[in-house]
Image: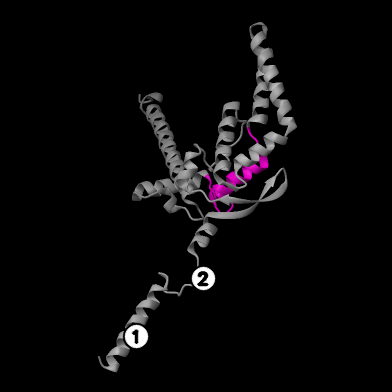
């Protein structure tokens, strides 16, 4: 092999080795690069989480869309015109169960179970409330038949309140914060959407056989987009039904509602 050809072969080998040390962006990898650390940094974040107003640094796990869906049926989209009214006990329990499932999912250090164990071992108020609940429930079951409807309602409300107090360990601000963070509400524009925005997006999507979220501008997570699509299509369906009812009413009025004035 001539020196010229040997030099060319060595040059090709060098180019090949250099290409192995580059990412798919064409940039050389940093010395000591550890992709596992980068992956860990993308999946877990140290965040100051409020616990009764005090910020505590916790390592939170970034959930994906499927994991959030497994926590229950809940949506970020609550339109102003649909809001209002105090949720009943069953609705409160549904919301709390969802929040608790999300908290268990995202808390990594410390884990939810560690916090629950700590609270259970040291929270004497909870211990007393458990005893109070047991006593009220026992007396209620023993005397239920003799109580009036009003008396039953008062005691049942007390039982429900105590169950909420001892059934969910984390403070309200902690659960609310973790849910907002998990759903991406700290970076998402989903809360800014109005009914008219969703209706217009759904109409365009139906006309062009696309998703309503394709016609809304803003920052939305994958979880948000699924919420948007479902909510927008439901609003469009409701709007179409309302128009049909209105049109049928007009048709009946024109066809039989007016008197014939011809002489």
At 58% from the left and 42% from the top, the residue drawn is 103
The quadrant in which residue 92 appears is top right
- Left or right: residue 236 versus residue 10 is right
The magenta stretch spans residue 179:
yes
The quadrant in which residue 154 appears is top right
- Considering every residue shown, the one lying at the far bottom of the view is 3
Task: Identify whether 224 is placed above or below 151.
Answer: below
First along the sequence among labels 2 and 1: 1
Coloration of the structure image: one colour
Disc 1 crowd rating (10 Å Cα; few below 14, some 14-19, many 20+) is few
Say if residue 41 shows up in the picture.
Answer: yes
State the CA–CA distance, disc 2 to disc 1: 25 Å
Task: Identify whether 233 is placed above or below 27.
Answer: above
Say if residue 199 shows up in the picture.
Answer: no
**Magenta extent:** 168-194
Residue 98 placement (x, y as % from top left) = 55, 37
- Considering every residue shown, the one lying at the far top of the view is 146
Q: Which residue is mark 1?
A: 11
Residue 133 placement (x, y as % from top left) = 68, 22
Element type at mark 1 = helix
Q: Quadrant of the C terminus?
A: top left
The magenta stretch spans residue 192:
yes
Indicate which disc residue 32 carries: 2
């Amino acid at each position: 092999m001539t020196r010229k050809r040997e030099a060319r072969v060595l040059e090709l080998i060098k180019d090949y080795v250099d290409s192995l040390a580059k990412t798919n962006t064409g940039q050389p990898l940093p010395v000591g690069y550890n992709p596992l650390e980068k992956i860990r940094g993308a999946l877990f974040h140290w965040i100051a989480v409020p616990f009764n107003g005090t910020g505590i640094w916790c390592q939170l796990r970034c959930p994906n869309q499927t994991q959030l869906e497994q926590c229950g049926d809940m949506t970020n989209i609550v339109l102003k015109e649909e809001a209002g009214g105090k949720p009943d006990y069953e609705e409160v329990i549904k919301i709390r169960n969802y929040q608790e499932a999300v908290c268990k999912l995202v808390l990594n250090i410390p884990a939810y179970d560690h916090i629950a164990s700590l609270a259970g071992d040291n929270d004497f108020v909870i211990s007393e409330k458990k005893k109070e609940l047991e006593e009220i429930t026992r007396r209620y079951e023993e005397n239920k038949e003799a109580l009036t409807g009003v008396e039953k309602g008062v005691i049942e409300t007390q039982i429900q309140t105590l169950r909420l107090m001892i059934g969910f360990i984390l403070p309200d601000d902690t659960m609310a914060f973790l849910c907002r963070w998990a759903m991406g509400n700290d970076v998402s524009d989903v809360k800014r959407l109005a009914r008219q925005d969703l209706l217009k997006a759904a109409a365009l999507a139906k006309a062009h056989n696309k998703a309503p979220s394709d016609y809304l501008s803003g920052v939305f997570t994958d979880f948000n987009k699924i919420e948007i699509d479902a909510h927008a299509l439901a609003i469009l369906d409701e709007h179409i039904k309302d128009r049909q009812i209105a049109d049928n009413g007009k048709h009946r009025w024109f066809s039989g509602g007016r008197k014939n004035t011809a002489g």
